[in-house]
Image (cartoon, rainbow, N blue to C red):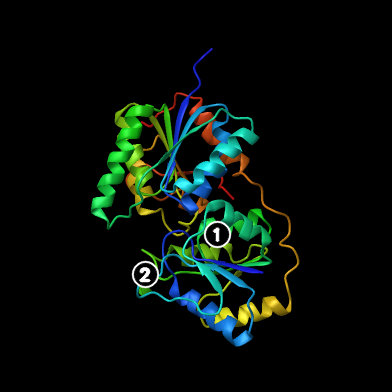
């Protein structure tokens, strides 16, 4: 089972349409997608089952059940994959195409590209081939699941601040 | 014994929320209120508090808005002000975006101490709200070491680890 998500805010037709085309040409019904509200003009996939939005508990269940995640390069999607030890393909949104406010997802993809279990499709032309490779050679479990919590140093810093009287300047 | 600190943890839904929640052991045992733009998170917040043997937090849902939706931004701001006046938090913490910026800015007027943890998604530069929040944050953190020298003027965000 493959779970595809574009995150909770914006549609991402370039990715959704590519995955739909991939499902059609590979004759697979393995994908379920959360694609945000396509509106009257947005792309509606024909070759995989999809919803606009799903509730947080269903989102977690879909993640748990998936063998592979396909997502925009958003931190919610990436963190969920790392904590559940799921291989994830990420494709960054581009501001020039109106897919996000700026190009921070390109920077995110660059920074997380070398994490175990994270695979980057830099654009829609790379995506189908990357999916083919991952289906042909399924990645073994994505190493150890990341902790459910932030770095102990960060948690400690915040906790110390809460229980201090510290104020800036 | 001193009263338990009152914490207001606020962010928009999605990645900001996931990051905010990953820091929750930092306010274990405190009197906590969560504020976010998606009501669907309420169930998880309550379940997690019960499972982790924490005091039951309060949960507030505010309208979602981005910086181009002026009318919604105003509604969001009014919602936040109402919650701040009701909660009177000792400490406000946010990972972003606009909602967190509002909460820090106005919460500080009401005497709260404030924490901004800029989203790890901002690997190249601080987020816009993160740069603006700097002057309202008593503790101003980035999750990338190379951004610890950024910021404007003589104040810089600090790096103290990340959420993942």
Q: Which callout, 1 or 2, points at the residue further toward the start of the chain?
A: 2
- Where A150 falls versus A161 (above or below)? below
Residue at the disc numbered 2: A39
User: Mark on residue B13?
Assistant: none
Q: Residues within 10 Å of mark 1 (few under 14, many from 20)?
A: many
Q: Residue at x 35, y 44 (%)?
A: B101
Q: Is A151 in front, or is A76?
A: A76
The image position of residue A71, as x and y in percent, is 54, 66
Q: Residues within 10 Å of mark 2 (few under 14, many from 20)?
A: few
Question: Disc 2: which chain?
Answer: A
- Where B136 falls versus A35 (above or below)? above
Outermost residue, right direction?
Answer: A140
Q: Residue at x 73, y 59 (%)?
A: A143
Q: Quadrant of residue A112?
A: bottom right
The image position of residue A159, as x and y in percent, is 54, 31
- Where B23 falls versus B29 (above or below)? below
Q: Examine the rendering and report whether any part of residue A156 can be seen.
A: no
Task: Judge left or right: residue B57 versus residue B153.
Answer: right
Outermost residue, top direction?
Answer: B1
Outermost residue, bottom direction?
Answer: A25
The image position of residue B94, as x and y in percent, is 43, 42
Q: Give the distance between the C-alpha atoms of the residues marked 1 and 2, in whole angstroms.
A: 23 Å
The image position of residue A147, as x and y in percent, is 66, 47
Q: Please identify, in this view, whether the residue under mark 1 or under mark 2 is nearer the observer.
A: 2
Residue at the disc numbered 1: A77
């Amino acid at each position: 089972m493959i779970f595809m998500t574009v995150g909770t805010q914006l549609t991402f037709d370039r990715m959704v349409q590519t995955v739909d085309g991939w499902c059609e040409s590979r004759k697979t019904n393995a994908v379920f997608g959360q694609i945000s509200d396509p509106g009257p003009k947005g792309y509606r996939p024909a070759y995989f089952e999809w919803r606009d939005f799903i509730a947080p508990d269903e989102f977690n269940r879909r993640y748990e059940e998936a063998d592979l995640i396909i997502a925009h390069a958003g931190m919610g999607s990436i963190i969920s994959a790392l904590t559940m030890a799921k291989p994830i393909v990420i494709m960054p949104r581009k501001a020039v195409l109106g897919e996000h406010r700026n190009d921070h997802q390109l920077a995110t993809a660059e920074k997380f590209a070398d994490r175990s279990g994270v695979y980057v499709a830099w654009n829609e032309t790379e995506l189908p081939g990357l999916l083919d490779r991952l289906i042909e050679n399924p990645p073994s479990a994505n190493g150890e699941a990341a902790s459910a919590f932030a770095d102990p140093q960060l948690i400690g810093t915040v906790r110390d601040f809460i229980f201090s009287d510290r104020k800036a300047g | 014994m001193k009263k338990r600190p009152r914490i207001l943890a606020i962010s928009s839904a999605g990645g900001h929320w996931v990051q905010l929640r990953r820091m929750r052991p930092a306010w274990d045992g405190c009197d906590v209120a969560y504020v976010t733009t998606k009501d669907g998170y309420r169930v998880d917040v309550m379940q997690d508090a019960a499972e982790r043997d924490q005091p039951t937090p309060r949960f507030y849902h505010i309208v979602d808005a981005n910086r181009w939706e002026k009318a919604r931004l105003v509604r969001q701001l009014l919602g936040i002000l109402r919650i701040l006046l009701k909660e009177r938090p000792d400490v406000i913490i946010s990972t972003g975006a606009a909602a967190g910026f509002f909460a820090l800015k106005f919460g500080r007027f009401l005497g709260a101490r404030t924490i901004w943890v800029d989203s790890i998604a901002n690997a190249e530069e601080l987020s816009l709200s993160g740069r603006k929040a700097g002057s309202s944050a008593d503790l101003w953190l980035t999750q990338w070491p190379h951004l610890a020298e950024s910021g404007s003027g003589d104040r810089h965000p600090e790096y103290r680890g990340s959420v993942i």
